């Protein structure tokens, strides 16, 4: 197995296992509580409004929005880590068909792996850290994935020709 | 018609009841099952569920206008049930197809997993069983609820789903350990690798699949940059608007509830287009590996590849157009899904014919 394929297959399997463990932990210890919190905030917003307590109603809507902001990112992280892991493993099986020199293939594989780790990690950190660093991580990670995907597709097409 | 591939390599790589055979059959069957479920959900549940949720939200806003907190709570209990119904069905679809993708992936990795043939076969069966039980558990969550549960939060269906998820993780860890052994001990490949295949079908599926994934990522990046934060801010604005309209007595909450429904639909179609482009791309690449096992005439193999790729593009494109074209686009998207399912079924039949041919040649008794 070539070095590029090893990077993708081993990295992909590790990322898949990590993504699944994260999902299991999330399903057991976080998701139900988060969903209850979101539903509770929204219900409270309407109940306060029915009681004509408008300021509290808006506070509850804000609480709902904050909880949903976190929830969306936490769920996205789980699905993106596993999805990207599967992509890494699939490419790992077939990467020798990407028509570039092995050194270039290794660079593409590293970029794909690093991007696959950083992009969801940045999204996850958005839920807990304020400031530009989490978004910068997510953007850098997704850019790495997109650029390496461009090269991979180009490599497959070159092989076809 | 193409002759059945009866080379020793193909036969050895696809031995009767081997881990690879179990994973390829199980994987394709799980993907077909998950996609069929998704199509049925889109046709019979999705829009009806959205409509009922909108009606319940409208009822909640009317209860607010009447100053009736009890009726608000009843409406939200109903909305909670509808959202759980919707969410668990989407998760059933996603987890069943994803388990199928993982099964196909593991089938590709079998030559590099340094475990005994018997262990690999048992792991394959366990993985397929987990792949069936996980979505089954998720599907049942809405119907079983907390009946006879030991916990006030988690019901028995969740326990089933979580146990099946744990089983999948354990299988994956053991497979990774086998792979690690192969890489570390530099043992020879444990079973024949996939037969080399430079066919038109394989090349088109590889290139087409990569292109679909790239399109999906670009669309996702566009969504994250342009729509995600705007949608979140708009949702908060609309919710405040519903509440303000309901309490000021001027009756504007119906329009605000309609806006909320439109936002939910806009968000749903954009995320669905993104995820389906990537999933179909992945599926196309995975299916490129099993083409040497598909025992169909070359012309038919090519036709099914074209049907699969066309359906893979048709579904997300028309899902996106649903907001502008309504039911017509919804119908076209469903047609795209059916094209993918039909192509998958045809390939599954081709693989079945190949196994029958190989087994008959090798004198394997049923």
Image (cartoon, coloured by chain):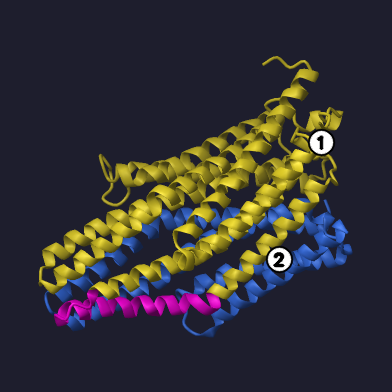
Q: Is residue B169 visible?
A: no
**Residue at (66%, 37%) from the top-left corner?**
B346
Left or right: where A67 falls relative to B171: left
Above or below, A69 against A2 in this view is below
**Residue at (10%, 71%) from the top-left corner?**
B66
Q: Circles 2 and 1: CB distance less than 8 Å?
A: no
Q: Residues within 10 Å of mark 2 (few under 14, many from 20)?
A: many
Q: Secondary structure at mark 2?
A: helix
- Mark seen at residue B331: none
Whether residue B225 appears in magenta in the rendering, the answer is yes
Closer to us: A153 or B171: A153
Residue B107's x, y, as percent?
Answer: 69, 40
**Residue at (35%, 59%) from the top-left corner?**
B50
Closer to us: B315 or A105: B315
Q: What chain does mark 2 sit on?
A: A
The magenta segment: B224-253
Q: Colour of chain B?
A: yellow
Q: Give the labeled residue for mark 2.
A: A112
Whether residue A41 appears in magenta in the rendering, the answer is no
Q: What chain does mark 1 sit on?
A: B
Quarter that holds the N terminus of chain B: top right
- Mark seen at residue B192: 1
Q: Which chain is blue?
A: A
């Amino acid at each position: 197995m070539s070095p590029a394929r090893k990077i993708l297959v081993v990295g992909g399997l590790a990322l898949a296992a990590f993504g699944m463990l994260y999902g299991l932990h999330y399903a057991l210890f976080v998701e139900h509580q988060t969903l209850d919190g979101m539903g509770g905030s929204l219900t409270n917003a309407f109940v306060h409004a029915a009681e004509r307590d408008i300021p509290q109603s808006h506070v509850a809507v804000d609480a709902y929005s904050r909880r949903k902001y976190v929830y969306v990112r936490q769920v996205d992280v789980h699905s993106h880590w596993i999805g990207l892991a599967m992509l890494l493993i699939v490419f790992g099986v077939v990467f020798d068909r990407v028509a570039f020199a092995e050194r270039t293939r290794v660079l593409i594989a590293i970029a794909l792996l690093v991007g696959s780790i950083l992009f969801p990690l940045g999204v996850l950190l958005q839920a807990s850290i304020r400031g530009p660093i989490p978004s910068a991580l997510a953007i850098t990670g997704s850019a790495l994935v997109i650029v390496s995907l461009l090269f991979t597709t180009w490599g497959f097409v070159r092989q076809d020709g | 018609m193409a002759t059945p591939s009866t080379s020793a390599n193909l036969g050895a790589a696809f031995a009767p009841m081997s881990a690879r055979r179990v994973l390829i059959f199980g994987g394709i069957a799980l993907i077909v099952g998950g996609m069929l479920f998704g199509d049925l959900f889109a046709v019979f549940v999705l829009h009806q569920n959205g409509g009922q949720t909108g009606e319940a939200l409208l009822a909640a806003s009317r209860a607010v206008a009447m100053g009736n907190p009890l009726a608000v709570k009843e409406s939200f209990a109903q909305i909670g049930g509808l959202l759980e119904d919707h969410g668990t069905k989407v998760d059933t679809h996603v987890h069943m197809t994803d388990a199928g993708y993982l099964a196909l992936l593991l089938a590709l990795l079998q030559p590099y997993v340094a475990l005994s043939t018997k262990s690999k076969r048992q792991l394959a069966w366990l993985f397929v069983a987990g792949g069936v039980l996980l979505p089954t558990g998720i599907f049942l969550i809405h119907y079983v609820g907390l009946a006879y549960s030991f916990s006030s939060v988690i019901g028995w269906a969740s326990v089933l789903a979580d146990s099946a998820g744990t089983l999948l993780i354990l299988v994956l860890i053991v497979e990774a350990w086998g792979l690690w052994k192969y890489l570390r001990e530099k043992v020879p490949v444990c079973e024949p690798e996939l037969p080399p295949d430079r066919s038109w079908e394989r090349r088109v599926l590889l290139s087409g699949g990569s292109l679909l994934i790239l399109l999906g990522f670009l669309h996702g990046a566009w969504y994250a940059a342009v729509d995600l934060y705007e949608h979140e801010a708009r949702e908060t604005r609309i919710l405040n608007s519903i509440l303000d309209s309901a309490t000021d007595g001027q009756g504007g909450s119906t329009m605000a509830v309609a806006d909320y429904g439109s936002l939910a639909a806009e968000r749903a179609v954009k995320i669905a287009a993104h995820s389906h482009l990537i999933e179909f791309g992945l599926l196309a690449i995975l299916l490129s590996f099993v083409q040497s096992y598909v025992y169909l005439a070359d012309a038919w193999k090519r036709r099914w590849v074209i049907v699969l790729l066309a359906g893979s593009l048709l579904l997300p494109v028309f899902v996106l157009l649903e907001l502008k074209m309504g039911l017509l686009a919804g119908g076209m998207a469903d047609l795209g899904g059916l094209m993918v399912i039909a192509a998958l079924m045809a390939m599954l039949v081709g693989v079945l014919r190949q196994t029958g041919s190989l087994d008959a040649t090798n004198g394997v008794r049923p």
